[in-house]
Amino acid sequence: MQRLEIFNRENKVDRPGDLFDVSIFVQKGGMLIRASGVTNTEDYFEIKVNGLDEVAKLQTQFNYRYSAMAKALRIMYDALVLMNPQKLES
């Protein structure tokens, strides 16, 4: 688990966000990314990735660095989104 600020993304711009506890689980048949609010405990988001092929693509894209994957999370329109790391660099 990693505690970090997840930014709100609006019009391709990151705005200050809230603190979340982020957990990433690789499970049989997929991956679960969970973000639970720290200051507002009612905030709770999940991303489910189905299929080991899709999980392998994500792991490769982020060089198996789950901390980088957590830092690429954004809140967009009240949904948790995993941003492409190449898009964040530009």
Image (cartoon, helix red, strand yellow):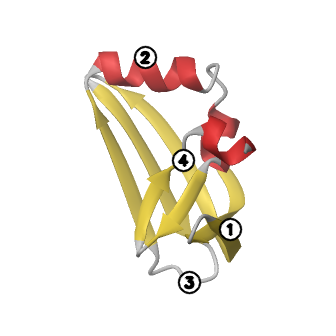
Could one spot residue 1 in this view of the protein?
Answer: no
Which residue lies at the image location 63% right of the left edge and 38% below the top edge?
85
The local secondary structure at tag 2 comes to helix
Q: Nearer the viewer, mark 2 or mark 3?
A: 2
In the displayed structure, would residue 84 be above or below residue 18?
A: above
| Residue 66: image location, x then y, percent | 62, 33
Q: Are marks 2 and 3 in contact (CB under 8 Å)?
A: no
Q: How many marks?
A: 4
Q: Report the quarter where the C terminus lies.
A: top right
Residue identified by numbered label 4:
83
Q: Amino acid at mark 4?
A: Met
Q: Which mark is residue 40?
A: 3
Q: Residues within 10 Å of mark 4 (few under 14, many from 20)?
A: some
Q: Nearer the viewer, residue 73 or 26?
A: 73
Q: Amino acid at mark 2?
A: Ala
Q: Nearer the viewer, mark 2 or mark 4?
A: 4
Residue identified by numbered label 1:
14
Which residue lies at the image location 31% right of the left edge and 18% below the top edge?
52
Residue identified by numbered label 2:
56
| Residue 18: image location, x then y, percent | 65, 76
The local secondary structure at tag 4 comes to loop
Disc on the earlier residue, 2 or 3:
3
In the displayed structure, would residue 41 be above or below residue 28?
A: below
Disc on the earlier residue, 2 or 1:
1
Per the model, the C-alpha gap separating discs 3 and 1 is: 20 Å
